[in-house]
Amino acid sequence: MSRNLYRKALPVLLAGVAVVAPSLYAQGIPNEALLPTTATITVEAKTLVPLDPKKLRLEVGRDVIPIRSVTPIPPPATQLAILIDDGLRGSFDNQLSDLAQFIEQLPPGVQVLLGYMRNGIVLGMHTFSADHQAVVASMRIPIEIAGVDASPYFTLSNFVKQWPSNSPGPRFVLMITNGIDPYNGSTSIMNQDSPYVQSAQDDAQRAGVAVYSIYWGQSWPRRAFGSLSGQSYLAQVGDATGAASYNIGTITPPDLTPYLKQFKQAVANSYLIQFDLPAEKVKPDTLIHIRLTTSQHGIKLHVPNNVHPGVNLD
């Protein structure tokens, strides 16, 4: 996507939606007893159209919550963390120029962090930067040593729990990894229902982070058997956080550009919704299930399954 086309998409980049359930009003709960809570959602449509707030329906439990406002958020409020698996095989170096171009063409002000996932932590940049040239300058080839990637979900959990920014705004992660969790039994097609993947998913929801991913297969024999499992886990985390995972089956993509284009489009079509939850019903680690639908034709919504009350991204 060209910079001009991306800028045309900015009017629908992000919007804040604040809502309160009618039943809460009926009970006379004072405003100070409500926790403003936000979540990032993405609109998928064949044509680029703005989301109509009047056609949204938000449900929390049995309560239907009315939308209070929709506010566009400019690119400088967006925080994007690109996390590269440090165990990716050497052919990934052929993709660095495409990734560099993607970063350089981001709208001015978008805050970017580029890091490498190794042994459960993120190496490289430790803060977000709007200097896209400096971010590109920090890019390197993964070290390509089998096992250094460990589980990408350990890294994701650790990263989102310590999100390196106190600034409000929508939060996006783009992971480039095989998605395999070697700590949940054998790395095979039967490797399912990992508690570590579930923990990473929950931690991302608590932090209000939409987790996108690009599947990149591995040449290591043990990891090759787990490719389907890895893709399944990446899709699970993406769906749960209102995001998506990109792949072309179990093979390594020959080119990152189509996926980077899809990801950029998804960010351009994302919105921030805001609503209120009763404070007296909230525990520190509570995750609340939400359901957001629309009667707007030609629109598909990608919404996080759960949100953490009190998360403020606005």
Image (cartoon, rainbow, N blue to C red):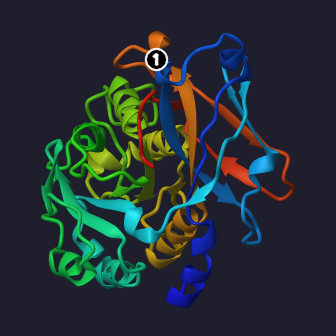
The structure residue drawn at horizontal position 35% and vertical position 75%, both measured from the top left corner, is 109
Q: Tell me which corner region of the image, top left, top right, bottom left or bottom right, holds residue 215.
A: bottom left
Q: Please provide percent x and percent y for residue 80.
A: 35, 61
Q: Please provide percent x and percent y for residue 149.
A: 20, 49
**SS at mark 1 in the image:** helix
Q: Quadrant of the N terminus?
A: bottom right
Residue 241 seen in this snapshot: no
When the figure is inspected, residue 58 is found, relative to residue 246, above or below; the finding is: above
Image side of residue 48 versus residue 282, left or right: right
Say which of 145 and 141 sits in front: 141
When the figure is inspected, residue 91 is found, relative to residue 14, above or below; the finding is: below
The structure residue drawn at horizontal position 47% and vertical position 78%, both measured from the top left corner, is 257
When the figure is inspected, residue 275 is found, relative to residue 129, above or below; the finding is: above
The structure residue drawn at horizontal position 27% and vertical position 79%, both measured from the top left corner, is 132
Q: Residues within 10 Å of mark 1 (few under 14, many from 20)?
A: some
Q: Please provide percent x and percent y for residue 9.
A: 61, 75
Q: Which residue is mark 1?
A: 279
Say which of 82 and 13 sits in front: 13
- Callout 1 amino acid: Ala
Q: Report the number of numbered marks.
A: 1
Image side of residue 171 versus residue 23, left or right: left
Q: Tell me which corner region of the image, top left, top right, bottom left or bottom right, holds residue 22.
A: top right
Residue 43 seen in this snapshot: yes
Q: Please provide percent x and percent y for residue 85.
A: 25, 57
Say which of 200 and 47 sits in front: 47
